[in-house]
């Protein structure tokens, strides 16, 4: 690689000296420009970045020191020499103070001159190198600072709380989420923190700090702020080692697990309800058998037969309940394979009413089906839609009066299908209507006594309707009857 | 007090099968049982029959119908003097965690004890004998 020629400026009013030094330096391979007076020297020296400038001290127009000042102020890295016949300590000191690198006394020999210029060029290289290194160092420092602030920003903006405690229990780092979760209004790095933390966290932190060996695992605990605050957090405490492996402190990560806890609670409530619902029919059957086996209780054959058939009915109810539960569980897990096909809702209604004919006849209920001509088909799973209609129709029978009536209407709207099932049965009180779709809820009042059911039928109906993005409406008057209206979208694609 | 002193027992349960079984069971041990199938009827029967003890199913029309009836009975002069028990299968086993043993629980559950389903008559009799108004 060819090195760039050093650029030299000669400022001198003496023509012979200008030409002489120029030729001398050009022979040495330098790139030389000359100025014949101070004004020209300033012009050239401020508009170009020369490596070295040799300035004559005494010039008729402008003093060499002024030229030096101007050049230095615009290009501080240009290495300048003052050349003069009037050598004195005073000017030497003054010129150095103004930024001159050296002083060349006139007259000088060519070797002396070249030697000085070479020194200047080297100095120039040194200056540029130093500057480059300085710039590079600043850049890398900036990068580290940027990296640090980037990490900082990331940790500060995550929703989990982060708190780092050193070996003596002082805060080494924290983010605002940590303050929020721990309900600490203000905190500074270096503050003693252990006293303000929940005891469960302090215990874990101390366990890590007090252990002889560094424990390379995470200890976690849950802190429930309820009922003061609707908040449950999980605190995970992990030791932070130094580079040499010794313990530096503990990092505590705080996560909000309130929602998760809520779901867990709902789940365990549901399990409790299921257990209770399963236990009751079992207790009834067990009770009948115990009575029949009890020698101290005397019952006749007729009564015994009654108890046996009531036991069978309770067991049937239990089987229905287990089946409904399995259906719900399958719907929830979505393991049930759906077979989507075009479904003619009229056929489903007709088949279902035929299927339930025995039940209808038992209570002498007449069923009137009114479906619009040219109803469009809907895309759905036949089993699910059949289940939907069956559950609603069997409710309309169960909760109907003897000799009651059921009206089933199906009509088409703008882009939906509407199915209405109306009965003339016991109806519902407003407070019963509100709980209708709750799991295991069954309206219990003087009019519903003796009607059996799992309490899951309408839960299943609601889930099926929801899964097709449909809607279910209930209209009911206590003692007069209930109307369920199902709206299902017609899938056109 | 001796169990013989509790001649007339009020039994309230909306499960007609369990009601009939427990009635038979208690009658076979010599008790006179009056029974009702709802909280409301139970309240009427309590006022009319003035029983010597009451056993009330917890979950009837509502989740807490049994508690409500207990509360009503325990507010009366007679109710304060007689043992009133809650009948339930909703105990630790099924995950509904309550009993009537701690001070706080007695504060809001106005009854003199919990009887688990199915009813064991011997357990009931021992509870009656240990009753202190």
Image (spheres, coloured by chain):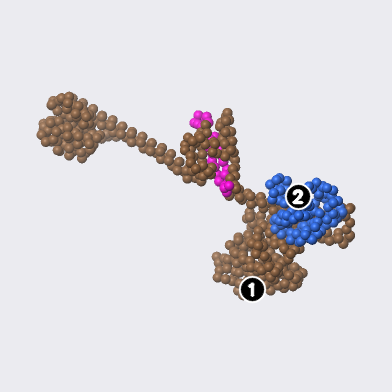
Chain colours: A brown, B blue
Which of discs 1 and 2 lies nearer the camera? The answer is 2
Is A336 part of what is drawn in magenta? Answer: no
The residue located at (68%, 69%) in the rendering is A481
- For mark 1, name the chain: A
The quarter of the picture where residue A426 lies is bottom right
Between A83 and A401, which is closer to the camera in this rendering?
A401
Q: Is residue A123 left or right of residue B119?
A: left
Across and down, in percent, residue A41 comes to 16, 36
Across and down, in percent, residue A99 comes to 22, 31
Residue at mark 2: B112
Which quadrant of the rendered structure holds the C terminus of chain A? bottom right
Reply above or below: A389 against A123.
Answer: below
Residue A109 seen in render: no
Reply above or below: A283 against A4.
Answer: below
Q: Which residues are magenta?
A: A228-257
Mark 1, Cα crowd under 10 Å, few <14 / some 14-19 / many 20+, is some
Between A55 and B9, which is closer to the camera in this rendering?
B9
The residue located at (77%, 59%) in the rendering is B47
Residue at mark 1: A371
The residue located at (61%, 72%) in the rendering is A411
Between B72 and A43, which is closer to the camera in this rendering?
B72
- The answer to whether mark 1 and mark 2 are in CB contact below 8 A is no
The residue located at (66%, 51%) in the rendering is A269
Reply above or below: A291 against A250.
Answer: below
Marks 1/2: CA–CA distance: 59 Å
- For mark 2, name the chain: B
- SS for callout 2: loop
| Residue farthest to the bottom, as pictured | A373
Q: Is residue A194 left or right of residue A324?
A: left
């Amino acid at each position: 690689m060819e090195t760039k020629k050093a650029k030299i400026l000669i400022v001198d009013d003496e023509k012979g000296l200008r030409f002489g030094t120029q030729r001398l330096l050009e022979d040495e391979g330098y790139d030389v420009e000359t100025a014949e007076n101070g004004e020209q020297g300033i012009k050239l020296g401020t508009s170009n970045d020369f490596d070295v400038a040799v300035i004559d001290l005494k010039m008729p127009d402008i003093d060499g020191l002024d030229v030096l000042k101007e050049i230095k102020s615009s290009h501080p890295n240009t290495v300048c020499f003052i050349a003069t016949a009037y050598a004195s300590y005073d000017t030497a000191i003054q010129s150095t103070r103004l930024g001159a690198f050296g002083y060349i006394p006139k007259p000088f020999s060519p070797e002396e001159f070249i030697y000085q210029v070479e020194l200047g060029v080297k100095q120039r290289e040194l200056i540029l190198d130093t500057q480059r290194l300085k710039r590079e160092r600043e850049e890398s420092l900036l990068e580290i600072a940027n990296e640090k602030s980037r990490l900082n920003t990331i940790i500060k903006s995550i929703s989990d709380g982060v708190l780092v405690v050193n070996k003596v229990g002082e805060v080494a780092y924290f983010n605002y989420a940590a303050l929020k979760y721990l309900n600490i209004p203000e905190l500074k790095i270096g503050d003693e923190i252990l006293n303000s933390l929940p005891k469960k966290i302090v215990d874990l932190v101390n366990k890590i700090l007090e252990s002889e060996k560094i424990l390379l695992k995470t200890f976690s605990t849950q802190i429930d702020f309820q009922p003061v605050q609707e908040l449950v957090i999980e605190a995970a405490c992990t030791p932070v080692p130094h580079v040499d492996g010794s313990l530096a402190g503990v990092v505590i990560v705080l996560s909000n697990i309130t929602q998760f806890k809520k779901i867990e609670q709902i789940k365990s409530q549901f399990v409790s309800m299921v257990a209770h619902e399963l236990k009751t029919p079992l207790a009834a059957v067990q009770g009948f058998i115990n009575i029949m086996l009890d020698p101290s209780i005397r019952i006749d054959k007729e009564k015994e037969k009654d108890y046996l058939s009531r036991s069978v009915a309770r067991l049937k109810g239990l089987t229905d309940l287990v089946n409904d539960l399995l259906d719900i569980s399958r719907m929830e897990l979505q393991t049930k394979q759906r077979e989507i096909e075009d479904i003619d809702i009229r056929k489903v209604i007709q088949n279902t009413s035929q299927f339930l004919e025995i039940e209808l006849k038992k209570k002498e209920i007449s069923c009137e089906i009114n479906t619009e001509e040219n109803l469009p088909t809907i895309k759905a799973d036949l089993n699910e839609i059949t289940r939907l209609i069956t559950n609603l129709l069997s409710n309309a029978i169960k909760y109907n009066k003897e000799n009651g009536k059921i009206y089933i209407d199906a009509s088409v709207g703008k882009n939906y299908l509407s199915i209405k099932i109306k009965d003339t049965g016991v109806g519902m009180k407003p407070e019963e209507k509100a709980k209708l779709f709750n799991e295991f809820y069954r309206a219990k009042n003087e009019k519903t006594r003796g009607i059996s059911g799992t309490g899951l039928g309408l839960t299943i109906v609601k889930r099926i309707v929801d899964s097709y993005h449909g809607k279910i409406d209930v209209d009911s008057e206590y003692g007069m009857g209930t109307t369920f209206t199902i709206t299902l979208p017609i899938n056109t694609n | 007090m001796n169990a013989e002193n509790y001649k007339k027992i009020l039994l309230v349960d909306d499960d007609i099968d369990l009601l009939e079984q427990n009635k038979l069971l208690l009658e076979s041990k010599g008790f006179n049982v009056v029974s009702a199938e709802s909280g409301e009827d139970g309240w009427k029967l309590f006022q009319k029959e003035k029983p010597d003890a009451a056993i009330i199913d917890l979950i009837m029309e509502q989740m807490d119908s049994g508690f409500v009836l207990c509360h009503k009975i325990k507010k009366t002069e007679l109710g304060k003097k007689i043992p009133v028990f809650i009948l339930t299968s909703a105990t630790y086993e099924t995950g509904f965690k309550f009993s009537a043993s701690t001070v706080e629980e007695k504060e809001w559950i106005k009854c003199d004890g919990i009887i688990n389903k199915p009813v064991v008559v011997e357990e009931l009799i021992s509870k009656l004998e240990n009753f202190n108004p």
